[in-house]
Amino acid sequence: METFDIIIIGGGPIGLNCALEAQKNKLSYLIIEKGTIVNSLYNYPLYMRFFSTAEKLEIDGIPFISTAPKPGRQEALEYYQGIARQRDLNINLYEKVEKVSRENNLFEIETTKGQYSAKNVIISTGFYDIPNLMNIPGENLAKVKHYYTEPYPYAKQKIVVVGSSNSAVDAALETYRKGAEVTMIIRHSEISKSVKYWVKPDIENRISEGSITAHFNSQLIEIKEKKVIFKNEYGEIQEIENDFVLAMTGYLPDFDFLRNSGIELQGECLNPLYNSETMETNIPGLYLAGVVCGGKDTHLWFIENSRIHSEIILKHILSK
Ligand SMILES: Cc1cc2nc3c(=O)[nH]c(=O)nc-3n(C[C@H](O)[C@H](O)[C@H](O)COP(=O)(O)OP(=O)(O)OC[C@H]3O[C@@H](n4cnc5c(N)ncnc54)[C@H](O)[C@@H]3O)c2cc1C
């Protein structure tokens, strides 16, 4: 079995960036990705627009040419997949890493397709695979979606959108504009401050003119086939007719995977333990990169501020 200098788990933008850095430094590496290249982006809403401008999404200084200031999903797929193709990155696709263990200073990596050995491992598995569940009765019904793709299935349907962050607001506006009757159920007292600055006035105006109904300080408590039940801001139980629930309640990193790899998780946000100067975890030779670093705080890291991780990690590996 070949022993790689580095195995990178996850072929998202940051995993690719780590591979480019390894390639530049002539280290042997393999990316193992459980889906397609930049699988999270592939699963984003079809018509989403990044909040970052194109140059902030660039990796390794490779120009990201976009026709609009903020690129959309398809342009980002073209950009990142194009890099993997052009730079001939060593990547195994549709192969999930199930276990990482360390024996005699080497890592053993078990996947759905085989076993690998590496001197160093970088975990860059992101947070988009596990929805942050509401844990309420009826959440498992087929009409409840934790991923929103496009508005067309919801035309002339009664939609409840749960949440008030970017994903919730985009889903509410898009479905409203394709003829859905949209009700937002929002735990907080206002639309999230992190909503894209050019979108926030749009949702606030649709709510104030009554085109979209919003229940603030409210919580969904049960979902049934034809209705939903929620607690409103006065503490009263309210019931409305409903066809679909778009539960835009966020996503979480795979904490079991991190734990089983030996990484310590700390505090309320289950922050994985790592040295911010090297990105090395409490296991020597095991590194973290990208948005997985934030634990439950998935707003802490994004492409723009985590693309630096690859350089930090490679510098540390080369210094050993
Ligand atoms: C809708 C949306 C919009 C966003 N907009 C922006 C933006 O405008 N600007 C910005 O900077 N950030 C944005 N982000 C946040 C962040 O940039 C993205 O989450 C980005 O994809 C993070 O890159 P990453 O490489 O760390 O993780 P990811 O892109 O999530 O990559 C992780 C990869 O690991 C794979 N994987 C997971 N587990 C395993 C396993 N066990 N074995 C093998 N492979 C595995 C996944 O399939 C995935 O491809 C957005 C996020 C979302 C959800």
Image (cartoon, rainbow, N blue to C red):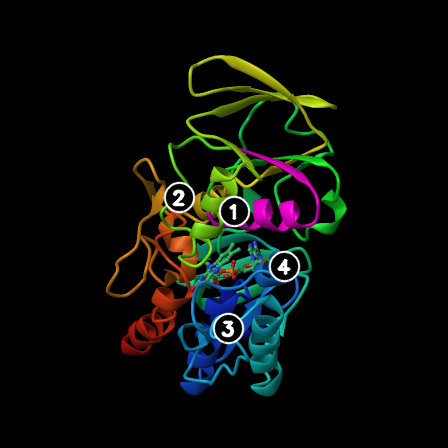
| Viewer-nearest residue: 169 or 126 | 169
Which one is in front in this view, the residue at disc 1 or the one at disc 3? 1
Query: Which circle marks residue 192 in the picture?
Result: 2
Q: Amino acid at mark 2?
A: Ser
The first of marks 2 and 1 along the sequence is 1
Q: Are marks 4 and 2 in contact (CB under 8 Å)?
A: no
The first of marks 4 and 3 along the sequence is 3
Q: Which residue is mark 4?
A: 34
Q: Residues within 10 Å of mark 2 (few under 14, many from 20)?
A: some
Q: Are marks 2 and 1 in contact (CB under 8 Å)?
A: yes
Q: Which residue is mark 1?
A: 169
In space, the residues marked 4 and 1 are separated at their CA atoms by 29 Å
| Viewer-nearest residue: 84 or 230 | 230
Q: Amino acid at mark 1?
A: Val
Label 3: which secondary element: helix
Q: Which residue is mark 3?
A: 16
Highlighted magenta segment, given as a residue range: 165-184
Q: Amino acid at mark 4?
A: Lys
Measured as percent of width and height from the top left, residue 155 is found at: 74, 44
Measured as percent of width and height from the top left, residue 147 is found at: 62, 46
In space, the residues marked 4 and 2 are separated at their CA atoms by 32 Å
